[in-house]
Structures are given as structure tokens and as C-alpha cells.
């Protein structure tokens, strides 16, 4: 009985949360007729194509020979990963720079250091970390899947709904009303900006993670030390060129640069 009630509650929740989001006027005007269109041709109609690659950047040729349904699934994945990466990149910087700010609960400094090690510190002090995170992700993904993905039966398995039913990435979340929904060109330009920022964020968050795994230093701490080292080396070169005695580097600075 409990299982039946649980399933019924889940269906009811998904049903309410995944109410259809009607595509904007701009989206309907920009949506191409995909009947008989190849995946490559369809891909070239989507936002995200910009300089310095005006004809689309696809060096591995993934779009060649792909179906429209596959292109739609890949674009939906790119949008989701880009949005998560933008939040993650911002979270890295905010978490590391404001960890001791009085407005934060972490004013005692218990959680500190590189961002990639902060969640372990939260768990080490008995706080619950993964459970609420997984719950929040599950709720968000349930809404997104119910809104934009086809029913996983027959030919609908692992496919995004058609363009007539779902605009890629449009979850109906625009509380500030920033989207120019009545201007197709401006709408497409804004979507391209989001994609480009998401792509940059995916590269950035990967670089952040690798840097902290290698150096065990916070992002701006690592940057400041490298900048300090370059300034010292440049000053040494200037002093040598002017036949001046080279200024000795303080021991504290040398110790920092070693780390």
C-alpha cells in the first residue's frame, strides 16, 4: 500500500510540475520545419553558431549523419551542462573568497581552503551534504524531464520532444523577464550568448578542478602567487640590465612560491 501511494504521489507531483511551457512568439517564429531535414542542416539553424566559427564548430563531425532527434538531445545536454558549469564556476569563486565573510554561516572558518575539498569538511563536521543535494537535483531533473522529454516507450526512448512541443532549454524560468520573446533575432542572440558563456564555464570549471588538484591552492591564491613570481623575475631582469644589485627575495615570499 505504501509503495502504491508513493508512486501515485510521484506521478501527481510530476504531472503538476511538468505543465507545458508554451514556446514564445520568437521561438515559434525561429523554429524550422524539421521534416526531411538532416541533422547537420538542422544544427545550423540553432543558436550557438558565432565567430570565429561562422559555419559551426564541429571538428569531430558529430553532426554529420546524425538525426534531428540526436541533435536535439545533444543540444539539451549542452544547455544543461553549461548552466550547471556557470553555477559551479561562480560557486568556486564565491565559496573561496567569502568563506569568512560575516554574512555567511561559515564565519567561524571551519570550512576553508580550495573549493574541491570544502564539501568533505562539511561532512566531517556532521552536517548533511549529499542527501539534500541529491534531492534538489532529483526534483529539478524530474521537472525538466517531464517537461521536455518524450515518454520512454517505443520510439520515444531517450529522445527530446519535437520542436512544436518543446523549445530546447526553455523551462519557463525567467523571473526578471529578460528574454525578448517577441523578437526572434534578439531571442536567438540571447540564446547564443547563454551557450557561449556555458561553454566557457565548462572549460573554466574543468581548469579550476585540475588546478586545485595539482597545486592544492585556491584559484585566486594560485593566480596571485604566479603573478608575484612573474613580477619578481621581471624586476630581477631589470636590475641586471641596469647593472644594479639584485634585490633579495624575502624568505616568506620564497616559502610561498615553493608551495
Image: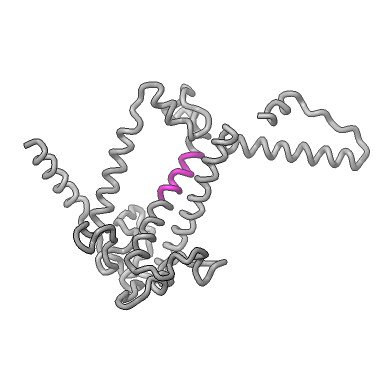
Q: Is residue 250 left or right of residue 53?
A: right
Q: In this view, does 38 lie above or below 132?
A: below
Q: List x then y, in percent, for residue 113.
A: 53, 29
Q: Which residue appears at 54% of the width and 36% of the height?
A: 213
Magenta-drawn stretch contains 91: yes
Q: Is residue 145 above or below residue 217?
A: below
Residue 137 image-quadrant placement:
top left
Image quadrant where one finds the C terminus = top right
Q: Give 12 or 213, whichever is nearer the viewer.
A: 213
Q: Is residue 117 above or below residue 9?
A: above
Q: Is residue 141 left or right of residue 46?
A: left
Determine the main secondary structure of the stretch shown in magenta: helix
Q: Which residue appears at 25% of the width and 59% of the height?
A: 157
Magenta-drawn stretch contains 109: no
Residue 69 seen in this snapshot: yes
Residue 52 image-quadrant placement:
bottom right
Q: Is residue 69 above or below residue 131?
A: below
Residue 37 image-quadrant placement:
bottom left
Magenta-colored span: 83-93
Furthest residue toward left: 1
Q: Which colour scheme is used?
A: one colour
Amino acid at each position: 500500500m505504501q509503495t502504491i501511494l508513493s508512486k501515485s504521489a510521484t506521478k501527481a507531483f510530476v504531472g503538476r510540475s511538468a505543465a507545458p511551457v508554451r514556446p514564445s512568439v520568437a521561438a515559434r517564429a525561429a523554429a524550422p520545419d524539421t521534416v526531411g531535414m538532416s541533422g547537420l542542416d538542422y544544427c545550423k539553424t540553432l543558436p550557438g553558431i558565432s565567430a570565429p566559427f561562422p559555419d559551426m564548430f564541429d571538428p569531430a563531425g558529430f553532426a554529420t549523419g546524425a538525426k534531428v532527434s540526436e541533435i536535439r538531445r545533444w543540444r539539451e545536454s549542452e544547455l544543461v551542462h553549461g548552466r550547471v558549469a556557470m553555477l559551479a564556476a561562480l560557486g568556486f569563486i564565491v565559496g573561496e573568497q567569502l568563506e569568512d565573510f560575516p554574512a555567511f554561516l561559515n564565519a567561524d572558518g571551519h570550512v576553508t581552503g580550495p573549493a574541491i575539498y570544502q564539501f568533505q569538511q562539511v561532512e566531517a563536521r556532521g552536517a548533511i551534504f549529499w542527501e539534500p543535494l541529491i534531492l534538489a537535483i532529483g526534483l529539478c531533473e524530474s521537472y525538466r524531464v517531464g517537461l521536455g522529454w518524450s515518454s520512454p516507450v517505443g520510439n520515444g526512448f531517450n529522445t527530446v520532444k519535437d520542436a512544436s512541443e518543446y523549445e530546447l532549454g526553455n523551462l519557463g524560468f525567467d523571473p526578471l523577464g529578460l528574454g525578448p520573446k517577441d523578437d526572434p533575432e534578439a531571442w536567438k542572440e540571447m540564446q547564443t550568448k547563454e551557450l557561449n558563456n556555458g561553454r566557457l564555464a565548462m572549460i573554466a570549471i574543468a581548469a579550476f578542478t585540475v588546478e586545485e588538484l595539482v597545486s592544492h591552492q585556491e584559484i585566486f591564491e594560485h593566480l596571485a602567487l604566479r603573478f608575484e613570481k612573474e613580477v619578481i623575475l621581471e624586476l630581477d631582469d631589470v636590475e641586471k640590465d641596469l647593472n644594479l644589485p639584485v634585490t633579495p627575495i624575502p624568505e616568506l615570499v620564497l616559502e610561498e612560491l615553493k608551495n
